[in-house]
Amino acid sequence: MSNEASTSGNETLTIRDNRTGHDYEIPITDGTIAAKDLGQIKAADDQPGIATYDPGFVNTASCRSAVTYIDGEKGILEYRGYPIEQLAEKSSFLEVAYLLIHGALPTKEEMDAWVHEITYHTFVHENVKSFMEGFRYDAHPMGMLMASVGALSTFYPDARNIGDPDNRHMQMVRMIAKMPTLGAWSYRHAQGKPFIYPDNDLGYTANFLSMLFKMSEKKFEADERLVKALDVLFILHADHEQNCSTNAVRSVGSSEVDPYSAVAAGVAALYGPLHGGANEAVLRMLRRIGSKSEIPAFIEGVKNGNEKLMGFGHRVYKNYDPRAKIIKKSAEDVFEVTGTNPLLDIAKELEKIALEDDYFVSRKLYPNVDFYSGLIYEAFEFPPEMFTVLFAIGRTPGWLAQWLELVQDKDQKIARPKQIYTGDRQLTFVPSSERWA
Ligand code: CMC
C-alpha cells in the first residue's frame, strides 16, 4: 500500500469568490484540498484568507496515515490492510500490536523477540506502587490509569528523546507491557485487595487476568476460552484511526512531548461517556429498561429526543460496526462459560426493534463496538468502572502506532486550529474599585 499523495490530470477544484469575482484553481489530492490553499482567497489584500469551520473535525483530514483503514458506509475495518475479522479469528493481541507498530506481520524470530521484550517489561518501579496506593479508596480506576501513565514519564525522563528510534521503541514496549499492570492495580485498589505482581510465565492476557483476580492460590489459571475472548476484545479495540482519543494523542504528541504524556491524554479522552465510556452507559440503560416489554416505550423516548440509545450510532460507521458483529458472537461464547445474562436478551431485542424503526434506519444508526462489549465485561465480573480501562489497554498499540507515525511525518506541525472569534473587542477596562463602588 502506498502512502504517497496522488493527484492526476484535471484533479482540481475551481472556486469563484462572488465577493471579488476572482476564480481560484485548487489541486485535489486523495479526495482532499489543502486547507492552506484556501488562504489565498481574500475579499481584499488586507483581509484574512478563507478558512474552514469544522467543529469536531467532521470533514477534515488531520494527517496521512497507513495504520488503519475504515469504510464506514460498507462496515469495513482493516489494520495495516488486514481485515479485522481475520485478525480477531486467527491472530493474537501481541501479534496485532506488532503489526500496528511495525507495519508488517512478524517473522517467528521477530515475534519471539517481541513477546520476550513485552513480557520482561511488565513490572513497574516500586514507587509506582506506592504512588497508586495514595489514591482515595474509591478512586475511579480510569482516573488512576490516566495519572499513572502520565507519571511514567517521570520514571523514564529519557523518553523525551523522541528523535531516537531505539529510544522510541523502548518506550513503546514499556507502555504496552505496563498498561495491564497499571490497569489491574487500579482495579485492585478500589477492591481493597493487595496488588499482584506480573507472572511472566503467563501470556499477555492471562497475566492480566492473574493480576486482576489472583488471591491466595499459587498460580492463577484463567479459563482458556475467557483468555481468548478478552484477547479478541483487545484486538478489536487496538486501533480505530482518527477517533477522539487518538486525535488527543496526536494533538498532544505534536508538541514533541514524551509518549507517556501523549498517551495519558489519550486515556483522558477515552474516559468520556461519548467515547470509551459508552459501554458502561449501555449497561445502565439496559438495566433501566429492565424487561423486553419496556423496550417500545424506551424507543419512543429516544425518538422524542429524551435520551440516546447508547451503543448505537457512530461518526464513521453508517452501517453495522464490524467489531460489534464479532463481539456479539464473542458474548455468546463467553456466556457458555459464565452462564447467560438476561440483559443480553434485552440487548438483542432492542437491536432488532431499533433496526426495523425508521428513526434509526433513516439516520443509519447501527450497533457500535460498545453495544455488546459491556455485557462481556460484566460476565468477567468487571465492575463498570473497569470497562474503559480494558478499552485503554487494547487501544495502547494503536495510540503508539499513530504517535510513531506522527513523529516521523514531515508534514506534521504542532496542532493549532483556528477559531472564529465571537467575543467583544477593544473594551475599556474599569478597575474593580470603580466598578464595585
Ligand atoms: N440514539 C439516538 N439518536 C442518535 C444516536 C443515538 N445513539 N446517535 C445519533 N443520533 C441521532 C442524532 O440525534 C442526530 O439526529 P438529528 O439528525 O435528528 O439531529 C443524528 O442521529 C446524527 O447524529 P450526530 O450526533 O450528528 O452524530 P455524531 O457523529 O456527531 O455522533 C456518536 C456519533 C457516537 C457520538 C453518537 O451516535 C452517540 O452519541 N451515540 C451514543 C454513544 C455511543 O454509543 N458512543 C460510542 C461510540 S463507538 C466507540 C468509540 O468510538 O468510542
Image (spheres, helix red, strand yellow):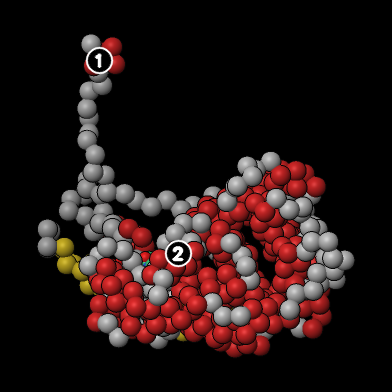
Q: CA separation, marks 2 and 1?
A: 49 Å
Q: Which mark is residue 436?
A: 1
* Left or right relative to 107: residue 15: left
Does label 2 or label 1 sit earlier along the sequence? 2
User: Cβ(mark 1) to ligand 1 < 8 Å?
Assistant: no
Q: Is residue 8 visible?
A: no
Q: Quadrant of the C terminus?
A: top left
The three-letter amino acid code for the residue at tag 2 is Arg
Q: Which mark is residue 225?
A: none
In screen coordinates, is 178 left or right of 262? Answer: right
150 up-or-down from 112: above or below:
above
Percent across and percent down for residue 61 are 40, 67
Tell which of 142 and 68 is nearer to you.
Answer: 142
Quarter of the image where the N terminus is located = bottom right
Alpha-carbon neighbours of circle 1 within 10 Å: few (<14), some, or many (≥20)?
Answer: few
Q: Residue at x 79, y 61 (%)?
A: 215
Q: Is residue 248 above or below residue 347?
A: above
Residue placed under numbered mark 2 in the picture: 284
200 vs 302, left or right, is right
Q: Say if 144 sits above or below 92 in the image.
A: above
Tell which tag, 2 or 1, sits nearer the viewer.
2
Q: What SS does tag 2 mark?
A: helix
- Residue type at mark 1? Trp
Q: Residue at x 50, y 77 (%)?
A: 342
Query: In which of the image's four quarters is ligand 1 placed?
Result: bottom left
For the question of whether residue 348 can be seen, the reply is yes
Q: Residue 412 in the image: state x and y as whole percent.
A: 50, 59
Residue 377 location, quadrant? bottom right
Tell me the residue at 76%/83% (across/down): 107
Q: Position of residue 273 (x, y in %)?
A: 44, 59
